[in-house]
Amino acid sequence: MGENIVITIARQYGSGGKTIGAMLAKELGINCYSREILKMASEESGINEGLFGMSDEKIKKAPWFKILNRPYDGELLTPEDRDFVSDDNLFNYQAKVIRDLAEKESCVIVGRCADYVLKENPNVVSVFIHADKKFCLERALERNSMTEKEMQKYIEKTDRFRGDFYRYHTGNEWADARNYDLCLNSGKLGFQKCVEEIKSYIKIRFNDKN
């Protein structure tokens, strides 16, 4: 793999994890990938990009999704296979893109269970960004025209989906601190200090390599 360092970021809705990821990438002079992974997985597989987004929406509503899990194992189906555009295979293509990116460059990857997909990679720093309800609500309301009550429900629903998505594809619990190297409260630290904390951790952990 070389000396690429990949920072994966899982985050509660409204905690600013995506913003922190982008700020970190900018300061380190590397790329930050989030929804771009869907576009790249579409190009890699030849499957319409819209299907990747639709898959997320579809499984949000599926009752089986909350109780089953099928941890990612790296298998990719071919176009001849009848399950080629199944939710599992769409995820596997996203995972392939994540692995290829880690092979190719140092980068920040937001969401998509990247910490689990890259769990065998010794140069991965996995981060979970969280904050209290009030902070997440206030921040989310700045960016969305919903009532406070609607927004609260939306946050709970989004975080529940992220937890279900993570459990389904990894067999693990999304908000379990043991899955991550660092868990940071962005409401207490602020975004810039979260970036500094991650950079300090990278420096301490990889000091002998850089």
Image (cartoon, grey):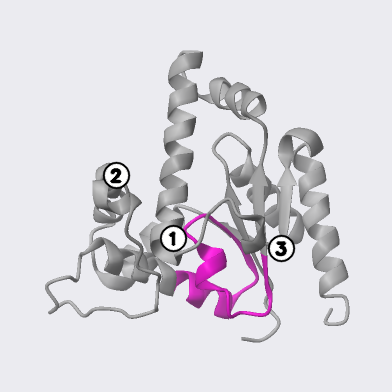
The mark lying in front, picked from 2 and 3, is 3
The answer to whether residue 129 is magenta is no
- Image position, residue 40 (x, y; %): 39, 64
Q: Which element type, helix, strand or loop, lies under badge 2? A: helix
Give the label on residue 104, or none.
none
The three-letter amino acid code for the residue at tag 3 is Asp
- Image position, residue 106 (x, y; %): 65, 71
Q: Residues within 10 Å of mark 1 (few under 14, many from 20)?
A: many
Hey, which residue is sitting farthest bottom in the picture? 2
Q: Find the magenta span and give its range.
A: 97-125
Residue at mark 2 = 57
Quadrant, the C terminus: bottom right
Residue at mark 3 = 181
156 in relation to 121, above or below: above
- Image position, residue 188 (x, y; %): 79, 35
Q: Which element type, helix, strand or loop, lies under badge 1? A: helix
Residue at mark 1 = 37
- Image position, residue 25 (x, y; %): 68, 56
Q: Could you give the CA–CA distance between mark 1 and mark 3, rounded to whole angstroms?
A: 23 Å
Quadrant in which residue 73 is drawn? bottom left
